Image (spheres, rainbow, N blue to C red):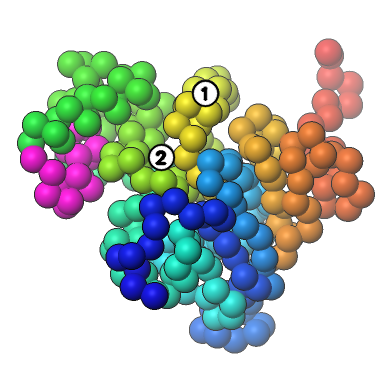
């Protein structure tokens, strides 16, 4: 299949078909094994699990930073191995912890990175930068010319989200984007992101180890343990699943013994 002919909208947008990924292709270094799930257009999928469970590996398989050693990942109707990797990644927004902004670029230049690579003209790029800054709650007149070191952690994350949305990609990948923030700022950004996700209707795959975050943001939760899926449910259904790892995560929501209500 020629990736240039892939339709803009395909359902499911993302499909994992018996995907295994092993370091150097060796079985004793397998990170994820026999992964099968689909993500429909407009869905917010939360990949939940402990450190080392394979969450970030699945994200990197979606945008072809990694290639499966078994099975295939299909994005918008085409296996990732058949996509031109640059075209694939420019159609997928990617937000990481602490935003990953270029320190020597201004906020505007960071957001404009992909539009400039796509040869947008200056007027269109400026209009889009200003639109996105307003979307994430930052006044362009105040923030566009700042450097990342002049921003708070929460502001940097807002800029990271804006940069990921710059060319209006249909898919957004988020790797624990709020994990490094203080609890108050994190809660604020979670609420803002939830409203933004509903407004934009993007297909979102979001990595977290925090069940509270998953329950707040997800339309669906997949729980990973040791590189395998052990639960796949809506937030309403998740706590009713009878599995030890589900119970362990659900127990994390309980107040500490002796704490005051």
Q: Is disc 2 surrounded by few (<14), some (14 to 19) or many (20+) residues within 10 Å?
A: some
Q: Quadrant of the C terminus?
A: top right
Q: Which mark is residue 98?
A: 2
Q: Magenta includes 29?
A: no
Residue sticking out furthest to the top: 261
Find disc 1 in the rendering and name its residue. 195
113 or 155, which lies in front? 113
Q: Position of residue 32 (x, y in %)?
A: 64, 69
Residue sticking out furthest to the bottom: 26
127 left or right of 235 in image: left
Q: Which residues are magenta?
A: 106-121
Whichever of labels 2 and 1 marks the residue nearer the N terminus, that label is: 2
95 left or right of 74 in image: left
Residue at image coords 38%, 29%:
158
Tell me if I can see residue 52 in this picture. Answer: no
135 left or right of 147 in image: right
Residue at image coords 13%, 44%:
120
Q: Quadrant of the N terminus?
A: bottom left
Q: Position of residue 215 (x, y in %)?
A: 70, 33
Rendered position, 141 above or below 104? above
Rounded to the nearest angstrom, the CA distance separating label 2 from label 1 is 21 Å
Secondary structure of the residue carrying tag 2 is loop
Tell me if I can see residue 4 in this picture. Answer: yes
Tell me which secondary structure the magenta stretch mostly adopts: helix
Of tags 2 and 1, which is closer to the observer? 1
């Amino acid at each position: 299949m020629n990736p240039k002919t892939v339709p803009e909208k395909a359902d499911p947008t993302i499909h994992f078909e018996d995907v295994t990924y092993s370091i150097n292709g060796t079985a004793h270094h397998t990170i994820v094994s026999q992964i099968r799930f689909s993500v429909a257009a407009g869905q917010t999928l939360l990949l939940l699990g402990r450190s080392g469970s394979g969450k970030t590996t699945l994200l990197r398989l979606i945008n072809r930073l990694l290639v499966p050693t078994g099975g295939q990942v299909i994005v918008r109707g085409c296996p990732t191995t058949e996509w031109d990797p640059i075209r694939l990644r420019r159609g997928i927004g990617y937000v990481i912890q602490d935003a990953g902004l270029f320190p020597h670029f201004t906020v505007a230049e960071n957001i404009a990175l992909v539009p400039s690579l796509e040869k947008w003209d200056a007027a269109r790029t400026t209009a889009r930068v200003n639109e996105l800054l307003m979307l994430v709650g930052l006044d362009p007149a105040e923030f566009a010319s700042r450097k990342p070191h002049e921003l708070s952690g929460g502001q940097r994350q807002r800029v990271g989200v804006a940069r990921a949305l710059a060319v209006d990609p249909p898919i957004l990948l988020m790797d624990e984007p709020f994990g490094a923030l203080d609890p108050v700022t994190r809660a604020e950004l979670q609420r803002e992101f939830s409203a933004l996700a509903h407004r934009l209707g993007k297909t979102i795959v979001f990595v977290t180890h925090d069940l509270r975050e998953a329950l707040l943001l997800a339309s669906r939760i997949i729980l990973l343990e040791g590189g395998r899926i052990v639960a796949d449910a809506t937030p309403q259904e998740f706590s009713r699943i009878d599995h030890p790892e589900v119970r362990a995560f659900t127990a994390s929501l309980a107040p500490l013994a002796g704490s005051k209500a």
